[in-house]
Amino acid sequence: MSIKKVVLAYSGGLDTSAIVPWLKDNYNCEVIAFVANVGQGDEELAGVEQKAINSGASSCHVVDLREELVKEVIYPTLKTGAVYEGQYLLGTSMARPVIARAQVKLALELGADALCHGCTGKGNDQVRFEGAFAALAPQLTVIAPWREWQFNSRQSLLDYLAEKKVPTTASATKIYSRDANLWHISHEGGELENPWCEPSDQVWMWTKSPEQAPDHAAYVELSFDNGELSKINGHAVAPVAAIELLNEIGSEHGIGRIDIVENRLVGMKSRGCYETPGGTILMAALKGLEALVYDRTSLKYREEVGQEFAQLVYDGRWFTPLKDALLAAATSLAEQLTGDVVIKLYKGNVTVAKRRSPNSLYSEAFATFEGDEVYNQKDAAGFIRLYSLASRIRALHQQQKG
């Protein structure tokens, strides 16, 4: 197969630094580096263009995808209530469709005939990237070096870079594997590979521990319009700035740490620690508002949609008709999610302190234990008799048999 031009999803880390010369050696092609700014931080992006050029790339394109990530993926996903396996707020998973789409767009603009990623053959990300590539540009060849090359350790990659005279700041020792974006940061490796080991303090990078968090609670008021955040503490905030602000507030109070063993799409279990401070606050606020405005059957259906959507996002099926259908259902329900929620943050705990909505189904007149004129308690007798009718008939049959 003749490959002339490849667009590589490039991070500037050890793996992708080695992929650039490896592609040139093995495919004799031009390599264009693509860097997605998804909010991983200025330190991660500093000097990345020069790193790519020094590795042998012909050019490097850094694309700011932060607003797309929030408006087109994070906010819509929040409306579904998607949480993978009851805990994971899908930080890595949600960023992949936006990154893959931008990579494909660049490749088509530059006339490339191949796409390349640095995902391992053991992980979920290879499926997420390649699933997106297949949906958006099936005519492009996909190259996955970790499924082809002979390297099997950090030292072997370092030796290869030394041979190719490619400068790197990486070392043979790397305790943790991390992935950061605007929504979260994930941690794997090191002591986390043993589920009997508690994460050490050096695992966590964003959030304070509950023990280090302030001894006083903080209150944050979040306002929503149709399920989307519109104000924080009464002030309008743009999507990216809103997530950054909530991350800052949540991190100070030890919010958003989880330590889970999850089921990967490829079949194995993996252990990861995640920090999602702003996302944890947003999810708690939306669930508090849902409890106020959704009737029981609507809430049950939203929960079903959320569970299906979480699996879909985790499995890398964003560019599918099913995603569009599930999102349409959640968006329709979320038209009721307008109101204000006050969240209390205290030493790692997130609780709903107050909530109100013009669409509230809660009525003090009905719920009160005091006398009222809108609910006749005698009516409950007929309701219970009909509600338990099947049990009554079953018991009568058993008595007759006896």
Image (cartoon, rainbow, N blue to C red):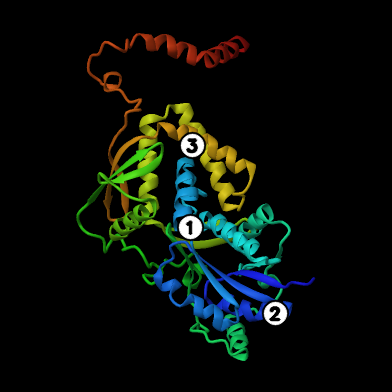
Q: Can residue 50 be seen from the camera position used here?
A: yes
Q: Could you say where residue 145 lies in the image, as x and y percent from the top left?
A: 67, 72
Amino acid residing under circle 2: Gln
Q: Secondary structure at mark 3?
A: helix
Q: Quadrant of residue 324?
A: top right
| Percent of width and height locating residue 4 | 72, 73
Q: Amino acid at mark 1?
A: Ile
Q: Which residue is mark 3?
A: 331
Q: Earlier in the sequence, mark 1 or mark 3?
A: 1
Q: In the depicted view, which residue is nearer to us: 182 or 92? A: 182
Q: Residues within 10 Å of mark 3 (few under 14, many from 20)?
A: many
Examine the rendered structure and indicate whether residue 114 appears above or below residue 263: below
**Residue, x 39% and y 55% (percent of image)?**
240
- Classify the position of the C terminus by image quarter: top right
Looking at the image, is 58 positioned above or below residue 324?
A: below
Q: Which residue is disc 2 drawn over?
A: 150
Give how far apart the Cα atoms at labels 2 and 1 are. 32 Å
Q: Which residue type does callout 3 highlight?
A: Thr
Disc 2, SS: loop
Residue that carries the numbered disc 1 in the rendered image? 260
Measuring from the top left, give residue 119's x and y in whole percent.
Answer: 61, 67
